[in-house]
Amino acid sequence: MHTKLPSFSIETFFTRLLTSWIFISLLNSLSSTTFLQLEFCAEEGLVMFLFKVLLCFLLFTIMNTLSSISLDIPLLLFGTLLYSFRVLTASSEVSFLFAVCLFTAFVLYYLFSRIEAEENRFHLSSRTGYTIVIASALFLFLYICTITISRYCLSRSSTFDMGIFIQMFHTMKENFTMYTSCERNEWMSHSSVHTSLFFYLLLPFYCLFPYAQTLLILQAGAVLLGFLPLLLLCRHFQLSPRCTMIFCLIYGLSPATTGGCFYDFHENVFLIPLLLFLFYFYEKKYLLRMLMLALLVCSVKEDAALFVLVFGCYVLIGHRDVKYALPLLGIGSIWISLAFTYLSIHGQGLMTNHYSNLVCDADKGLLGILQTLVTNPAYLLTQMFTEDKLEFAITMFLPLTILPFYTRKYSRLLLLIPFLFINLLPSYTYQHSVFYQYVFGPYMFLLYMSLLNLRELKKKPKHALLLLCLCFSFYAFTSQIGARRYYFQDYCNNSAQRAAVQEMLSQIPDNASVSASTFFVPQLAQRKTIYMVDGAITETQTIYETDYAVFDLRDGFSDEKLGEEIQLYIDHGYATLEEHPGVYVILKRP
């Protein structure tokens, strides 16, 4: 009996050699923590490395000889993904992430014609696809909860904004108002800063479980809930189970979907499910439900009405759908006018300082911003394409690659307005970072654009782009979001410090007034009166006359003027109640 030897071409030789090179590089990276440094190259001799590659090549040749099918393509794909994952766990630099994605793109381009032939054998049922999506969604929910709660329990959440929201919900539970004392270190309503009426819809959950962790779980729940309208949109657009599964995974793995959750709790995260449901109800032509969602979007924040206005403009210009566009434009215009008027008259005014780089005349306010937008496009380009904003844009778009722009229907580019105006134009640092709350709304518009374009693509480019997007999403999550696991690691390794903080909390009565360092405010915020101690008191030589003052002594978290602040309280008659070296000191007013 004769065994037929597999065909061996130059292409096969190159593929197997490339696979061997990647696998040996992977094994070397697993055996060293310095593999990203030049010193590692000196340690690894060239002759020994080539010998390892040769042995690996021979091993893969034997495996292919014994196998009834060719293993070259699966091994190269698996090795590329595994090696990319390994190197991205060692660095979170966006430029490095982009380089790894570029390398993977070249490999996938080389393999795609063969991958396409193999994938035709792979059939995914709707039930299997939904099962994978649900399992991924639950994993993401648990991951967000674990990391964010670990951060809070480590006392690494600050007054801005975790402490503010904890005290605000405590006050809402007590008397249905949004008053806080730590937001501006005076007794005032949070509604004077932001018209976030949506918080009252979350209040019943907090009343049932009055803990700070409840807010973090609700936030993770918003990301989890976003999977539902996304699945409904994919089903409405008649995407295959495979495409639906991949697109939902892209949503969950995108840094812009989850990154903002790791800077504590914010109302903006609820824009994720609300906007996706808004898009879905419009696509299904459910007018009343769409208008209800438009109102809910507006209730999240005063500037959230911008999303409704942009969507209304898209519906009007892109679809000429007056029946649906005019109500959207009406709701958005009325809400934003009322909210801005209220804040200007009864509140702290509009936070135009975020757009200080666009205000050509401080006396004109919003009109000054509008004047800059209209009269000087060249200046706008200088503000939009800075180095840090380009890195931010790369992180935002990597999971979607070119999908948002893969269309000839130019009216869809209107959906880019939130990204441009909220993320790229302002000089406010936090608005062009995936780790703050300002990305949630704009990214939902980018996802919606991608879905609209995806449904119109032919099978071949659709599958190629989705595979590329899935790889890039996985890489981006590994590099940017996976790095946040250190909070859980620190939680496990700092039990003594956590116990010390709990001891401190047990010594302060619930009804006592407190002044505290910023990272201790969230732990102490469930009370009527709490102020954040900062360097301002040393300049004015005045203190917050509270029953207790708590100072953070931890390295890396204590205030630069910590010694002066403590001494100032002592000079006003406060005495040391207890001190835990390297963690905290409690002063008590006699």
Image: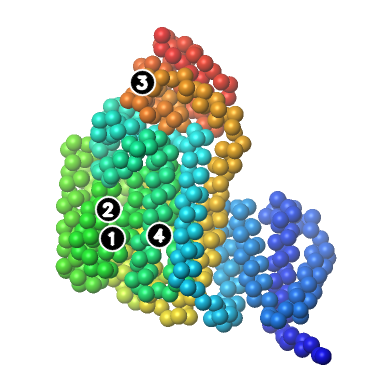
Q: Nearer the viewer, mark 1 or mark 4?
A: 4
Residue at (52%, 58%) from the top-left corner?
A: 476
Label 1 sits on what residue type? Leu
The residue carrying mark 2 is 297
The residue under label 3 is which amino acid type?
Answer: Asn
Q: Is residue 518 visible?
A: no
* Residue indicated by mark 3: 511
Q: Which residue is mark 4?
A: 227
Amino acid type, callout 2: Val
Where residue 95 sits: x, y (%)?
Answer: 55, 58
Residue at the image point whose x is 25% and y is 71% from the top: 318
- The residue wearing badge 1 is 278
Quote the CA–CA distance across marks 4 and 2: 17 Å
Q: Quadrant of residue 286?
A: bottom left
Mark pair 3, 1: CA separation: 43 Å
Question: Which is more N-terminal, label 2 or label 3?
Answer: 2
